[in-house]
Structure formats: structure tokens, C-alpha cells
Image (spheres, helix red, strand yellow):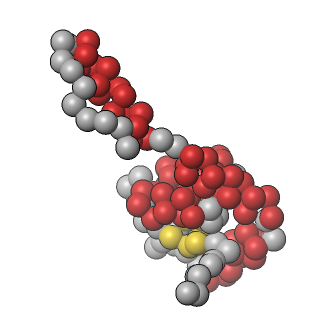
Amino acid sequence: SQQMRCILLVHSGASGIMSAAMYAGVPSIVVPAGFEQNANAMWLKSMGIGIETSFMDKLTFGELGNKIRAMLNNQGMRVASREVAKAIRAETGVANAVELIEGFLQEQGGDKIVEPP
């Protein structure tokens, strides 16, 4: 089967697509429209795995082109994105949640209710 690959992702910065980019190990160019999107852009930037543009209603083709060129020339951002993806994939969130919930239930006098995956 053919595997699709991309070197960067241009998106709104909404939490779902941002998480998908992080999981895939692909750096982001965030074009925020509002809500949490601008804060998410700042968070990605602080981790070295994304950059932001002007808000969607102010963005020009020239600005977007400049951001794409800058990201294509930024090997460090691609490396950082792959490292974040590796860390995310190593997480054991479900098992950790089960342990926390069971610990709470045991403190309350209950027993284990499920086996961790």
C-alpha cells in the first residue's frame, strides 16, 4: 500500500487537527480564526513545532507563502515534531487513568473494576 506523507500541515489550530499533526510528527502552520486556535498556535510555537500566521480574515497569499518557505527551510522544527510524536506514542494514558480511578475507588472502599489494557 502507498503511504501518504507530508512535510508540514497548514490548519486552523483547532484542538483535533493540532493533535493529529502532533501525533503524526508533522510541524504546523496555524491560521487561526479565533477561539482556542491562537493559544494553540502559541503553544506549538513554544514547543518549536509550529508557527502562526495572521488571523484567517487578515492572511494574505504572500504571508502564507513566506511562512511555508520558512518552515520548509527549518530542519529543526521537523526534528522537534518527530520527537513530540515519539513522546506522545510512548504515553500510556489509558492505563494511567485506570490506575488513578482504581486508586480512588480503593480509597473509598471499593475494589478494582477493570484490568488495564
Image quarter of residue 53: bottom right
The answer to whether residue 43 shows anywhere in this view is: no
In the image, residue 28 above or below residue 36: below
Percent coordinates x, y for residue 102 in the rendering: 29, 25
Left of 87 or right of it: where is 114? left
Which residue sits at x=73%, y=69%? 71
Residue at the location (52% across, 43% down)?
A: 91
Give 37 or 59, whichever is nearer the viewer: 37
Residue sitting nearer the eye, 5 or 18: 5
Q: What residue is rendered at 57% in x and 64% in y?
A: 24
The quarter of the image holding the N terminus is bottom right
Q: Residue at x 26, y 12 (%)?
A: 107
Say whether residue 73 is left or right of residue 64.
right
Q: Is residue 12 left or right of residue 80?
A: left
Q: Which residue lies furthest to the bottom in this view?
A: 2
State the image coordinates of residue 79 (x, y, percent, origin top left).
75, 58
**Considering depth in this image, is 115 or 86 the residue closer to the camera?**
115
